Image (cartoon, helix red, strand yellow):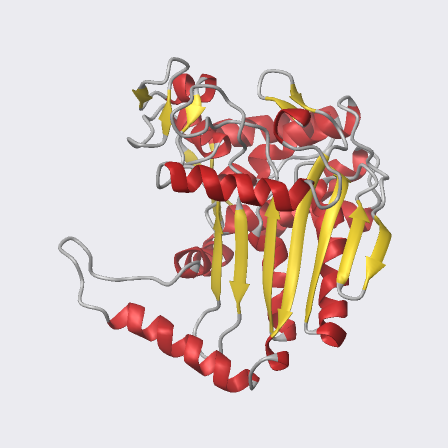
Amino acid sequence: MATEQRIQVEALRELVSKIFEQVGMDAADADLLADSLVFADLRGIHSHGVLRVPEYVEKLTTKGVDPRGKPYIVKAFGGCVVVDGGNSMGQIGMHFAMNEVIARAEDHGIAAAAIRGSNHSGAMAYFAIQALPHDMIGIATTNALPTMAPWGGAEKIVGINPLGVAIPTSAELPIVHDAAFSGSSHGKIRIYQQKGSPIPEGWALDKDGHPTTDPSAAIEGLLRPIGEFKGVSLALIMGILSSMLSGAAYGLELGNMEEGPRAGQDGHFVAAIKIAAFEEVERFKARVDQAIRQIHDVRKAPGFDRTYAPGELEQLREQEYQRHGIPLNDVTLADLQRVADRFKLAGVMR
């Protein structure tokens, strides 16, 4: 059974950034990539946190991702943009694209970008919240390797293709939704596998299509969609937005779980909506505050003493982890230490 240790945020971010510089990224891109992973860990989304560092190092050194890749605009029409990620890590291209749509939404009210030539991009909330300081709603989605079957099928042909949405508020914490259209993700199941714990029921099927709580069987098998056929439908839609508008790979064109993704073939989609183009900003934000307070004040079901708005629990967790450090299990820490040793860097435990 894996144990956990609290790691100070800045020390973790600094180490991960130095690791990415060692594989050839410039300092700014290394900082951004490290920040995106630590951001996920801060919110308790460890499936998209520094657990990914060894995998990302391999992508950037032996799996064909360009550590010096730079995103660029392929074409633009008003508030619509197509961005090529330049075979950079997905966080680099998505951050670039989100900045672009925020700037264009200032003029057009709504702007969107379809991104191609990219790679794994981490937590969608990281990009959606870029819109919040601009009094905009942020939207981000991405394609993913196929890990689900269509409802009634037994083959992996649909990605879980997550959706991130961030909505600004006035007094309350902003609404931040970030979730895939499956009961869980492989990254989260890997955390359970590391801890030697069974996964919750309803998350996965084994390779023969039977429900399982064994994380190893789940990784080999199929992820289950949320809401049965509805989850598959929404995942399909996110995959189309993320790939077919830009010409990025869709579904099995991207690769498979056994052989991994094809470098530089991922696609994403981001958008920004300027609230002032539709409604007086403070009135909108005050109404969102009120909607959140209604959630807080609702009569509680048996077994619950508090109700949360989307993303609230993660933001409260971030505040606590900023103060007391991020809990990471010893498997993740050992993997991180091995990478640090490879580049002759002191680890966070030294």
Q: Quadrant of the N terminus?
A: top left
**Where on the picture, by quarter, is residue 120?**
top right
Left or right of residue 80: residue 170: left
Residue 10, percent from left and from top: 62, 52
Vertical position of residue 290 compared to residue 230: above or below: below
Residue 12, percent from left and from top: 61, 44
Left or right of residue 82: residue 193: left
Residue 332 visible in rendering: yes
**Where on the picture, by quarter, is residue 24?**
top right
Residue 40, percent from left and from top: 54, 47
Residue 185, percent from left and from top: 47, 34
Name the residue at 40% across, 35% down: 225
Name the residue at 75% across, 65% down: 79
Q: Quadrant of the C terminus?
A: top right
Foreground pick, 77 / 300: 77
Vertical position of residue 63 compared to residue 132: above or below: above
Foreground pick, 268 / 219: 268
Residue 8 visible in rendering: no
Q: Residue lying at the far top in this picture: please name it.
A: 208
**Where on the picture, by quarter, is residue 132?**
bottom right
